[in-house]
Amino acid sequence: MIKELVTLIGRIGSRLYGERSEFEVFRPEEKFGDFSTNIALKLSGKLGRNPKEIAKDIADKLVEQGDFASVDIAGPGFINITLKDRTLLEALSGAHRPEKTLAGKSIVVEYSDPNPFKVLHAGHLYTSVVGDGISNLLEAAGGKVHRVNYGGDVGLHVAKTAWALLEYLGGEKPEELDNVKPAERADWLAGCYVKGTIAYDEDEKAKAEIAVLNKKIYEIAINRDKSSLLGKIYWRTRAWSYDYFDKFYARIGIAFEKYYPESTVAELGRKTVEKNTPEIYSKSDGAIVYEGEKDDLHTRVFITREGLPTYEAKEVGLLFKKHKDYDFDRSIVITANEQSQYMQVVLASVSGFAPSLVEKTTHLTHGMVKLPGAKKMSSRKGNILKAVEILELAEESSKRLNPSTTEGVIIGAIKYSFLKSGLGGDIIFDAKESVNIEGNSGPYLQYALVRARSIINKAGNGEQSSADGLDSSERSLARKISIYPEVFTVALEELSPHHLCTYLYELAQTFNRFYEANRIIGDERFPVRIKLVQDYAHVLESGLKTLGIDIPEKM
RNA sequence: GCACCCGUAGUUCAGCUGGAUAGAACGUCGGCUUGCGGAGCCGGAGGUCACAGGUUCGAAUCCUGUCGGGUGUACCA
């Protein structure tokens, strides 16, 4: 619809004035009409003529060539277009089915990225929800989306955990692991990490032992050594960790196609970097680095003096591995803000020898999750906000308001509260206000859908017809429903689910107003109204599904 | 120091490839009983869009500077 208008208006503009001008066709406030264009304002500068006169000429042509209810000139020279009710209604039935603009495209989306052996914190929950929302968006546009998850199964944090773990087991005694109850495994490992971290910082002897362990574990992981005593302990507890991740993701309704543990990309990264030294990377002080200053970035170490690949080199390996596995047309990586600049260095370096991979890669970053009034969190002291704590807070607030609240509503509330803001800044998670019940929230949308469905069920299969005219609240609803494809396109192009949230909330509000003002069942306008309710329900359902929010049967 | 991100009602946020009186939610104050689910709806109060310049017919939006907050800045991830 909007595309056709752009073409039509552009053609009229260039025929009348022989000028190809930049202009926009956009959705104005409802009172101005269905579409507006600023073409007259843009042309007036070039032509040195009064914008209102230009607008008049173009508006006349629009009336001639199009089938509109009205074309008006307003304000400084906007042309406002109102569609005929019939045209509007025709657009509704298919509104909930987005165009498959990504059909046949392979897209890898990497997000969440927790480290095995450590606890899932609020940030992991946040990126999981956002990453999944973005994946759903791409999928809804027909893309073949591969959700993947990267994490450090080797490295200092693992050695710290292992150190404390060995203390507990009384040495390399894998059989002692049987004493850890299945339900307590994840917490127990997280506790070991905290204990190991403290020891590393405060005890020189422990620090030295951890350094040795770190090398050993690296060997075990790279060589898939599952037979040594330490190897047995490593692989078993590592599996516990992944099991814990899987269970958590299942609980929030998210599933990954593949985990990329660091140990599986480290060698590839190291070799790739070495192969491109000294052409791209250079030796410095015994290490291999990329001199970022030539790209206005920082120099970063890719391979340490000891010959071990750093995170940067592993990231290079990961990029190639993902491409090998999925031959992607596009790769999206979502991480915290801190990674922003080092990722630029990684990508800048790779663009020196594999530019096409870099062109296909998009790095998105997000802020931290905070509680209202909370000070900065310190992970060192182990007082970080855990993912389950978010769930508990939401559950508690929700059950206080309605004891029979289901998990689907609680998780939906959390997801919506995370998705409704744009990516980038830190977000405040207010369990009581943001997550629950009233206002711009998940439950509001879920309720708005449940209610509509209830009417549809009650109405049965009545006869339907397209109306000859719409009253004002009917038209508002119809107009809002018809906008969905445009909002979807913007959300997709910007990889921003929050546009969808804003829209769906406005849609639900519009519906609730319509619902308050109009009787549906039993009214003489039943055929038109029930059709609107159905089209509305389809769009809201499609939108919530894209956000990954559960659709309850009742509430 | 340098680089990047951010600063919009009391609070949490939209709006930012320039456009019409800057929107919403929460909170606050005041309303809605004959109806399909009131977890709803309607209305009021509440803003120097951090500050100062600049570009423009037009700036919350673009540019420069200042202030304030966050992050990164060589062998952690």
Image (spheres, helix red, strand yellow):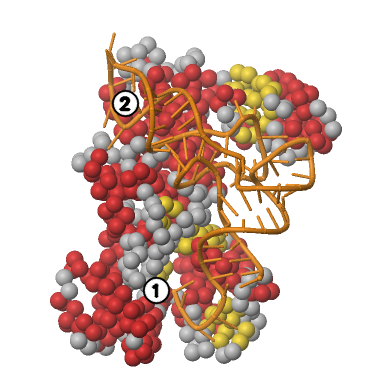
* On-image quarter of the C terminus of chain A: top left
Name the residue furthest right: A48
Q: The residue tagged with tag 2: helix, strand or loop?
A: helix
Q: Is the residue under label 2 in contact with that under label 1 (CB below 8 Å)?
A: no
Q: Is residue A149 visible?
A: no
> The numbered mark 2 sits on a residue in which chain?
A
> The numbered mark 1 sits on a residue in which chain?
A
Q: The residue tagged with tag 1: helix, strand or loop?
A: loop
Q: Is residue A369 above or below residue A543?
A: below
Name the residue furthest top: A524
Image location (x, y in percent) of residue A450: 31, 33
Image location (x, y in percent) of residue A216: 35, 88
The residue beneath circle 1 is: A152
Q: Quadrant of residue A273 in the image?
A: bottom right
The residue beneath circle 2 is: A456
Q: Is residue A386 above or below residue A273?
A: above
Q: Amino acid at mark 2?
A: Ile
Both marks 1 and 2 on one chain: yes
Closer-to-camera residue (B49/A27): B49
Residue at the (40%, 14%) spot, across then down: A525
Q: Amino acid at mark 1?
A: Gly
Image location (x, y in percent) of residue A364: 52, 59
Residue at the (43%, 48%) spot, across then down: A419
Horizontally, residue A133 falls left or right of residue A63, namely left
